[in-house]
Image (spheres, helix red, strand yellow):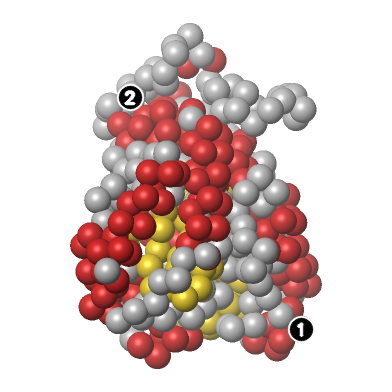
Amino acid sequence: MLNEGLHFDTLKIRAAYDPAEHRQSVAVPIYQTAAYEFRDTANADGLFALTDPGFLYTRVNNPTVDVLERRVATLDGGSAAIALASGMAAISYTILSLAEGGGRILSSPYLYGGSVDAFQKIFPKFNIHIDKSPNINDIAALERDLKSDTKAIFVESVSNPNGVVADMEALAALAHKHGIPLVVDNTFATPYLLNPIKHGADIVIYSATKTLNGHGNLIAGLVVETGTFPWDNGNFPQFEETQYVLRDRSTGRKRTFLELTPDAPFVTRIRLHYLNYFGAALGPFDAYLALLGIETLSERVTKQVSNAQKVAEWLEKNPHVEWVRYPGLPSSPYHALAKKYLPKGAGAIFSFGFKGTIEQSEAFLNAIELWSYHVNVGDARSLIVNSPKTTHGEQTPEEQRFANIPPNLIRLSLGLEDPADLIADLDQAFKKVFR
């Protein structure tokens, strides 16, 4: 049992329940293999019946990927995790598994543009409908938005790009009152700043492409579960299904997902259904890169949060800035929630309103020298982008207004550079535009 009193950067990262054979290595070995040799026919029988631990095929599980899953589950206080080929795969497999066969997801409107686009264009074709509610932090009003076939509440802990902080404890209480899980995309906060499970969340999603890895060199996603949600409450019959591989080796009786892994039925079902049949497997080398990134998570995020606070405070006083949306600022309507849920800092990504024409804002972006102009976030490098035309460009003007994304919004993702240099670069770009 890990000592819960240890500091985060010692706590759980390097010793997160790694299999014993990996602990002799400074770095986790990269198991760059498609399949694994069975010891004998009995071993093969046990692996395919899922009664014996081990690895069958890298599309479904891999030793390097397994360590990443164990570590992230431990960091978040979950019972299990599954790593996938992208954050969008993590979101998609979660939604499909929750509402399989038809149902609704009650969602915040303050989401990553790719999530919104998928919710509108793809899932309705699977008879899964997403209800975006503007009442996400008004629990009494939100309860009226629930329907008889609502299967989950889905929010981002800190939203992209506006920094809306979700009141997770209130949302979890509402979800559990109606027998459904709270799903939290915790990509911006990471397990270092926030553990949604401690505040009642049942499923946590990450795009590990972002801050978890932090170096802009891989695409990956993760789904973490608590292992405590009652999937047998009558709202989710799919978890009580049997499958041919879930067979007791001695009796031949088929078992349900709840019988097979009572502490991890959700990620097990994603693994055996969606990952097994749809693919989107994370490769072992990408898992290795993610593991390297997690080693420095606490140090990177501490510096990035400090940089974000300084740059946000400078921008708030700039005459060419209309507004700054950063929950770390006292002026933010989400400042109190940020102090409650994010005591170590409100993250390193925020947005501001450029006070000028669209042409001037584009001239400003073109004048930037130190910041990188591209659409990732959570990188070791500082990034800048005009979200309404890029990350959220697939949304119509009406949809952007509903999500409170005005045309003059510019999103910043703070990296590890000196904050004085980052401010100086913004300052010189403003001066070029307005001189």
- Residue 202 at x, y = what percent? 66, 57
- Residue 15 at x, y = what percent? 59, 22
Q: Residue at x 60, y 28 (%)?
A: 9
Q: Left or right: 46 with respect to 209? A: right
Residue extending furthest toward the front: 435
- Residue 49 at x, y = what percent? 49, 38
Q: Nearer the viewer, residue 87 or 101?
A: 87
Q: Left or right: 298 with respect to 180? A: left
Q: Nearer the viewer, residue 302 or 418?
A: 418
Characterize the local packing of mark 2: few (<14), some (14-19) or many (20 or more) Cα atoms within 10 angstroms: some
Q: Nearer the viewer, mark 2 or mark 1?
A: 1
| Mark 2 residue element | loop
- Residue 97 visible within the image: no
Q: Residue at x 51, y 78 (%)?
A: 109
Q: Label 1 belongs to which residue?
A: 140
- Residue 161 at x, y = what percent? 46, 66
Q: Label 2 belongs to which residue?
A: 31
Q: In the rendered view, would you say 63 is above or below 316? A: above
Give the amino acid at mark 2. Answer: Tyr
Characterize the local packing of mark 1: few (<14), some (14-19) or many (20 or more) Cα atoms within 10 angstroms: few
Q: Residue at x 30, y 63 (%)?
A: 431
Q: Quadrant of residue 395?
A: bottom left
